[in-house]
Amino acid sequence: SQAMRSIGGQFQPTSSVELRNQLRAEFGREFEVIATQNFLVVQPKGRGNRWPKMFEQCHRSFVTYMERRGVKVRQGRFPMVAVVLPDARAMYDEIARLGIDVSRVAGLYANKCNRVMTHDGGAISMIAATVRHEAAHQSAFNCGVHSRVNDTPSWVTEGIGQMFEPDAMSSGRSGTRLVERVNTDSVRQLRDTIDMDDPNEVARWVDRMIRSDDLFRNPTTIHTAYALAWSMMFYLAERDTEAFADVLNFTATRPPFETYRSGQRMIDFERVVGTDVRDFSNQLTRFVASLP
């Protein structure tokens, strides 16, 4: 914060027309820029309306889902940008150009430039699930569900991303049966790596998840971390909607540029969710056991 200073004037977002022209100049003649209500979608020429419709539907479904559960959602002041590259190699070249270090992804949300990026050269079912995950991140940060300037626990942000991977969550049918909202890959990962019949083991994982983001940084635990984050947020969304909204509204309004220390993360969790880790883990264990 010592490098920050106040400047004069007011923030003026780039207009849709200006941004569209900038994107055309940036990506060149082989690409087109399609405008929707909430997006500017950069894609190779001749790809039609499939990608613009997907991004728009993802965002609208996200907003509707959150508003119905009492989560505070604000209206964006400028269009979001989604970039579809022709194949995986082109996507990795673009990611490298932006200075982002990743490997083997079908898409990502780049917070610093506020863009979702994916490619059009693989199995659409796998790519679409990744796009829905990354689009949920973009919607969450642009709608104020997450804050760009505070330290939000990864179990919250990644849990939300995992929640929106199933097609039913982003196709306007999120009010259908619970079985269609379940992230089956996350359920499988949990059952393969954690003894979900042992509440004590579940509690140990949940405790670590709440206290720090270390599980997401360790390659041996990262996949289980994503699955557990999904189960925690999905449980709250399905069984304790008030706590689900409280978690998101609280984390979105924490003080900016403040380190979120382990002990405080636990204190806040138990206060906002209204139970201790042991009871929460017991409830989570029963909930996951009930899933198909």
Image (cartoon, rainbow, N blue to C red):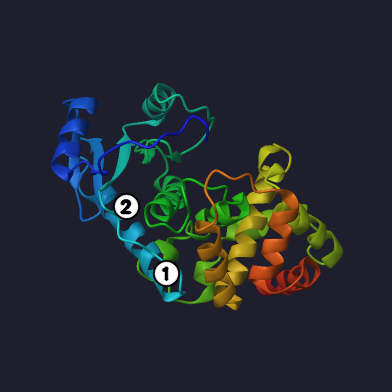
**Residue nearer the viewer, 86 or 91:** 91
Disc 1 secondary structure class: helix
Q: Which amino acid type corresponds to the residue marked 1 in the rendered image? A: Tyr
Q: Which quadrant of the structure image shows residue 107? A: top left
**Residue nearer the viewer, 227 or 87:** 227
**Residue nearer the viewer, 52 or 100:** 100
Report the residue at 37% width, 69% height from top.
Answer: 64
**Residue nearer the viewer, 270 or 100:** 270
| The label number, if any, that marks residue 274 in the structure image | none
Between the C-alphas of marks 2 and 1, the distance is: 15 Å
Q: Which quadrant of the structure image shows residue 230? A: bottom right
Q: Is residue 203 above or below residue 100?
A: below
- Total number of numbered discs in the rendering: 2
- On-image quarter of the C terminus: bottom right
Q: Are marks 2 and 1 in contact (CB under 8 Å)?
A: no
Report the residue at 73% width, 70% height from top.
Answer: 280
* Residue at numbered disc 2: 55
- Location of residue 172 in the rendering, given as x and y in whole percent from the top left corner: 35, 68
- Location of residue 196 in the rendering, given as x and y in whole percent from the top left corner: 78, 64
Residue 48 as seen in the image, left or right of residue 251: left
Asked if residue 198 shows in the view, the reply is no
Q: Which amino acid type corresponds to the residue marked 2 in the rendered image? A: Phe
| The label number, if any, that marks residue 65 in the structure image | 1
